[in-house]
Image (cartoon, grey):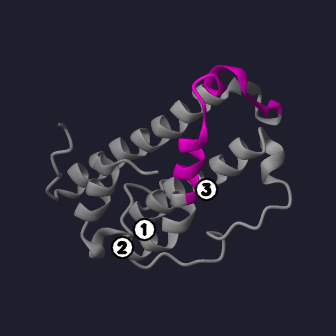
C-alpha cells in the first residue's frame, strides 16, 4: 500500500535514471521500488498467516518478473495491493493489540498493529533514500510534504 508520497517520488524519477545507484553495494531506484512493492506483498502473507510461516512454500509473483517502468510495476502490484487493503479494512480495532505475529525466526513477535506500522515505516525509509538518490543525481525532487 505505497503511500501517495512514495508513488509521487517514484514517478518523478526519469526512466533513464531508474537503474542508477550511488555505489556498487546499493539498490538501484528500480530495485528499491520493487523491494517496497514485493515487501508489501510478503508482509501481507505474513500477516494473514500470523507469522513467518506465511512465507513457507509461497509462490512469489514478483520473483520472476522484470521491472520495466514505474507505471507497469504499479499496475502489476495493483491486485495484490487491493487484497492487502481489503485485509486492512477487515481488521477490528481490538485486533491491533490482540493478534500476535510470530516472526521468532527473525527474532521477534509483534502485535498486528506494530507490524502495520512497520510496513509504513519500511516504505517511508525507502522513500527517503530515493529522495537522497535524486538529490545526488541532481534531479528535481517532488514536494511530498502536506
Which residue position holds label 1?
74
Say which mark, if any, is on residue 71.
2
Question: What span is colored magenta in the figure?
Answer: 83-104
**C-beta proximity under 8 Å, tags 3 and 1:** no
Nearer to the camera, 91 or 46: 91
Q: Is residue 114 above or below residue 120?
A: above
CA gap between label 3 and label 2 equals 17 Å
Residue plotted at (42% across, 45% down): 126
CA gap between label 1 and label 2 equals 5 Å
Say which mark, if any, is on residue 104.
none
Q: Is residue 14 above or below residue 114?
A: below
Locate residue 97, reporting x and y percent. 65, 20
Q: Judge from the rendering whether residue 78 lies leftward or rightward of residue 91; answer left or right.
A: left
Q: Residues within 10 Å of mark 3 (few under 14, many from 20)?
A: many
- Queried whether the magenta region covers residue 98, the answer comes back as yes
Mark 2 secondary-structure assignment: helix
Q: Judge from the rendering whether residue 90 lies leftward or rightward of residue 25; answer left or right.
A: right
Q: Judge from the rendering whether residue 120 lies leftward or rightward of residue 90; answer left or right.
A: left
**C-beta proximity under 8 Å, tags 1 and 2:** yes
Residue plotted at (27% across, 54% down): 9
CA gap between label 3 and label 1 equals 12 Å
Say which mark, if any, is on residue 41.
3
**Mark 3 vs mark 2: which is more N-terminal?**
3
Mark 1 secondary-structure assignment: helix
Q: Judge from the rendering whether residue 72 lies leftward or rightward of residue 58; answer left or right.
A: left
Nearer to the camera, 81 or 13: 81
**Mark 3 vs mark 1: which is more N-terminal?**
3
Tally of marks: 3
Locate residue 85, reporting x and y percent. 52, 50
Asked whether residue 133 appears in the rendered view, the answer is yes
Q: Residues within 10 Å of mark 1 (few under 14, many from 20)?
A: some
Asked whether residue 25 appears in the rendered view, the answer is no
Amino acid at each position: 500500500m505505497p503511500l501517495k508520497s512514495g508513488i509521487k517520488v517514484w514517478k518523478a524519477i526519469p526512466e533513464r535514471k531508474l537503474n542508477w545507484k550511488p555505489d556498487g553495494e546499493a539498490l538501484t531506484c528500480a530495485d528499491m521500488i520493487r523491494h517496497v512493492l514485493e515487501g508489501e506483498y510478503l508482509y501481507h502473507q505474513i500477516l494473514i498467516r500470523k507469522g513467518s510461516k506465511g512465507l513457507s512454500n509461497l509462490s512469489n509473483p514478483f520473483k520472476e518478473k522484470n521491472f520495466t517502468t514505474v507505471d507497469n510495476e504499479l499496475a502489476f502490484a495493483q491486485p495484490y495491493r487491493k487484497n492487502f487493503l481489503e485485509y486492512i479494512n477487515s481488521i477490528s480495532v481490538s485486533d491491533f493489540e490482540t493478534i500476535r505475529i510470530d516472526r521468532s525466526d527473525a527474532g521477534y513477535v509483534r502485535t498486528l498493529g506494530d507490524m502495520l506500522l512497520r510496513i509504513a515505516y519500511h516504505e517511508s525509509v525507502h522513500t527517503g533514500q530515493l529522495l537522497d538518490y535524486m538529490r545526488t543525481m541532481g534531479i528535481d525532487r517532488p514536494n511530498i510534504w502536506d
